[in-house]
Image: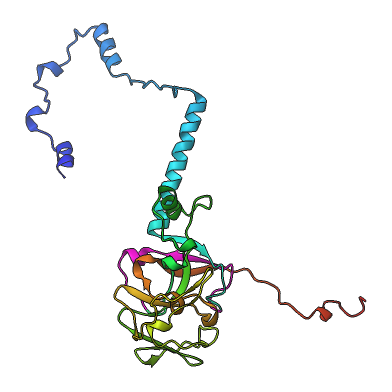
Amino acid sequence: MKQQDSVTISDNNNQSSSDDPQLISSPGDTASDKEASGSSQAPVQKKTKDRPGNPVANLLKDGVELVVVTLALLIAIRWGLAEARYIPSSSMEPTLQINDRILVEKVSGHLGAPIARGDILVFYPPASQMPNGKDLSNDPLTVFGRLTGLPLLPNEPAYIKRVIGLPLERIRIKKGVGVFVNDVLLPEAEYIKERPNYDLNVLGEIGGRTESSFIKPYGDKNEEIVVPAGHLFMMGDNRNNSADSHVWGFLDQKRVIGRAWLLFWRHLEAPKYPRNLETAPGQD
């Protein structure tokens, strides 16, 4: 490095030698000269200054700086790495239970890792499923709440479902049998709660009752169900108790928040027994 070279390499023309008359000591050196020389070699003490200003103002300034740094770290972690979510419904049973806590990772999405069938995704649902049918809001307070997840700020609801159909794949559901992708029956026995109790063959059959109304996103179209480019077909593992793509249609991949990566908390409850067994013998 050039800077290191300039420190370690010296110029021979500037080196001192015994021939330099300025460095030859003589018996005639006076005491004052020695004192002057000694004083020039004495260490210089740096003056320290107390922190100026009002202590209360300094405390407030420190508090503001701490809050700003904390929020910046929170946004960086939540946006770039991961966020925690809890499960509010039974739509993903038996895989996920109500009140389970999961970690949603976002690194793979930022790195462009492709979404695969079977991935469990957390996402913002289509506008038809949002409160009052309004899509994601872009006002500063809501965006800040979306970035931080702070409970005192507005936060849009998020869904969690499993990827069943990928872009350009054909989807068909047969009652009591299961889901067919490109005419191949998916082996799903290890994660679904039960087989679907409905048929789904054409776009016009997609629809159902939501929290507020009955919807048919594609009207009465008699076309086969083909997942559009950039979209996904999502389903809950609890097939007969899940508002998923068989109700509201295809999911735009731009609405994906991240992948459910880690289940880190599940509250265990005691089993419920018949009431007539609650009293032990001899305690009547």
Outermost residue toward the front? Answer: 220
| Residue at the spot 11% in from the left edge and 25% down from the top edge | 17
Q: From the viewer's perspective, tell me whether residue 105 is left or right of residue 191.
A: left
Q: Nearer the viewer, residue 98 or 254?
A: 254
- Which residue is the extreme one toward the left? 13
Residue 262 point in image, percent of width and height: 48, 69
Foreground pick, 174 / 90: 174
Quadrant for the C terminus in the image: bottom right
Magenta residues, dominant SS class: loop
- Magenta-highlighted residues: 94-116
- Nearer to us in this view, 114 or 41: 114
Q: Is residue 125 above or below residue 68?
A: below
Quadrant where the image shows the N terminus: top left
Task: Tell me if I can see residue 223 in this picture.
Answer: yes
> Horizontal and vertical percent for residue 242?
52, 77
* Residue 63 versus residue 244 in the image, above or below: above
- Is residue 245 placed above or below 9 in the rendered structure? below
Task: Inspect the magenta stretch and tell me whether residue 107 lies in it.
Answer: yes
Q: Is residue 115 visible?
A: no
Is 12 magenta? The answer is: no
* Residue 228 place in picture, x, y as percent: 31, 77
Q: At which x and y percent is residue 216? A: 43, 76
Q: Eyeballing the image, is 275 above or below 264?
A: below
